[in-house]
Amino acid sequence: MLLFILLLNIMVWVITVNQLLKRIFSLPGSMLLRIILSIYLTLTIFSFLYFLSLLVSLSIMAFLTGIFIISIILLSFTWKELKKITFRSGTGKISPVQLLLILVCVLAITGIFIDVAQRYKYGDWDGWALWNLHAKFLASGSLYYRLFSSNLAWASPDYPLMLPSWIAIFWRCLGNFSPVIPSVIAYIVLISIALSVFASLHIQKQTAVGFLFLILFPMDHVFIARSSTQYADTLMALFILLSMILFHHRNTGDKKLYYLLGFFTASSAWIKNEGILFFLVFSFYFIFSSWRNRSAITRYFTGALLPLLVIILFKTGYAPVNGLVKIQSVNTFLQVFDISRYIKIGQFYISLLFTDFPVIIPLIVTAFILDRKYFLSWNSIILMTMQIGFLSVFLFTTRDLTWGLNTACDRLTHQLYPALIYTIICSISIRLKYLHLH
Amino acid sequence: MILVLSALILTWLISFLRGLERKETNIDRLSSGLYVIRMILPESADITLFTNMDPARETELLAQSQFVLAPRLVVKDRPAPYILLIEDPFFPGKKMENDRQICSVHKNNLVYTLLKRKD
């Protein structure tokens, strides 16, 4: 019964939020992207509200009642528009043949996901020992605070709580700790990545390129396998991708889009600690690129306000100090001058690109041939800074460097991978369109 | 055709998820062994874990026990009100003479014993 109420709430929220987003982002063909944004905007707000409900010891019924009341309020704002909805959306709609092709691609991705996810009933090691473990504590209600005990230092209790809170909400409503929930969430996030890229390219009238991406996506077994491990890295990849998509569309939509951009960028810090770096890097370059547009910057940070408040509350009031930060000393900073570390990190990273991310090198070469301006674009600079930032972490680790690279480098690159492919594809397709016209 | 494909995707997913739920893993076997102990132990309990196995296996069991028993806290190097002893019966057992045994379960080739620490 509680699960039914939750699903009903999610449905009402997504429909009404989608209608509200239509006021600020109504380009032809943008329905699919708006639905994806609505789903993750809804779930992210649910995550914040659930965490806050734990702090004030609200029962799950009170939490569901609260979000139901908010959904009624949202419905009242959008009721008149909802009454006029038809399923024919005019120009930019997807034809039945195109919808068929999308479903075939989704079927292929589903098949591969099912094949690899069978190994991970409770996720890979960090899946059950970390993310699903955190979810269990959050699902326990009044005993959530035991997650932050010093006895659980090995389980990284400083990690943000978006994914665990989603799992916890469903577990609490279901009444048991079914392994189905984290697996379904992992699947939905994976499909969302594929469809988000397609949706954005469809808006840019690059539907053929979007279909090419969807057809090739299932061939990336490594990415799909990593997505099935139930780690938060794929969710992080999705939010970085959505942020880059919104950034790409910022000049084509309503100025209120900047609120959404700020919200998604800041919310990435609620997924993993790397999201804090992403928010800082993105914000820095956003301010730099938009310094003449003060209203855009104001809207961006206003959108980021709610996520930032929740994250600051969590980090200052509940999360212990991060293990990596805690053990820093003068000696670890002296590692910056050790050239052998740079060589080792560089060799490992390049080898990783060839083995686990074989698409990146050919794409970068293609971009270099067709559109060198991509490497001077804000998209490229943001993602390159992020990658350098991630690799720099290995300079300061006190643990064995080889162990650190083997266990984390692939996951960090995984987070940037979809956004990198998306931005390069956008750049190349725009360039090819320009060359075709001229 | 669209409906057929959608139905196929859904059917495939549901079948996979059902199979996943029925699948038995090490965590499921541990959970089965700790079932009675979970019924007895309050959710706010702290438990010290002891085993008679090698350190690597002990570390794995600590993490898995923590996942199964959460929100109870499972610790290794700190005395707690309760003690969970997980033993491989083929190896010498640990003597816990000073503590009161509450229950013992032999399941899936492991012996799970819950004790209350005598203060």
Image (cartoon, coloured by chain):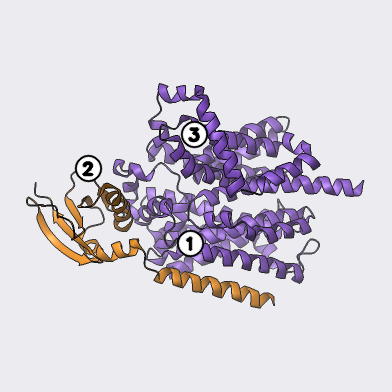
Chain colours: A purple, B orange
Element at label 3: helix
- Residue for badge 1: A183
The chain holding disc 2 is: B
Q: Is residue A166 left or right of residue A284?
A: left
Residue A170 seen by the camera: yes
Callout 2–callout 3 Cβ contact below 8 Å: no
Q: Position of residue A289 (x, y in %)?
A: 71, 32
- Residue for badge 2: B77
- Residue for badge 3: A394
Against A432, residue A292 (above or below) is: above
The chain holding disc 3 is: A
Element at label 1: helix
Label 1 packing within 10 angstroms: few (<14), some (14-19), many (20+): many
The structure residue drawn at horizontal position 38% and vertical position 57%, both measured from the top left corner, is A139
Element at label 2: loop
The structure residue drawn at horizontal position 81% and vertical position 62%, both measured from the top left corner, is A91
* Cα gap from disc 2 to disc 3, whole angstroms: 30 Å
Against B110, residue B56 (above or below) is: above
Q: Position of residue A287 (x, y in %)?
A: 66, 32
Residue A76 seen by the camera: no
The structure residue drawn at horizontal position 86% and vertical position 46%, both measured from the top left corner, is A434
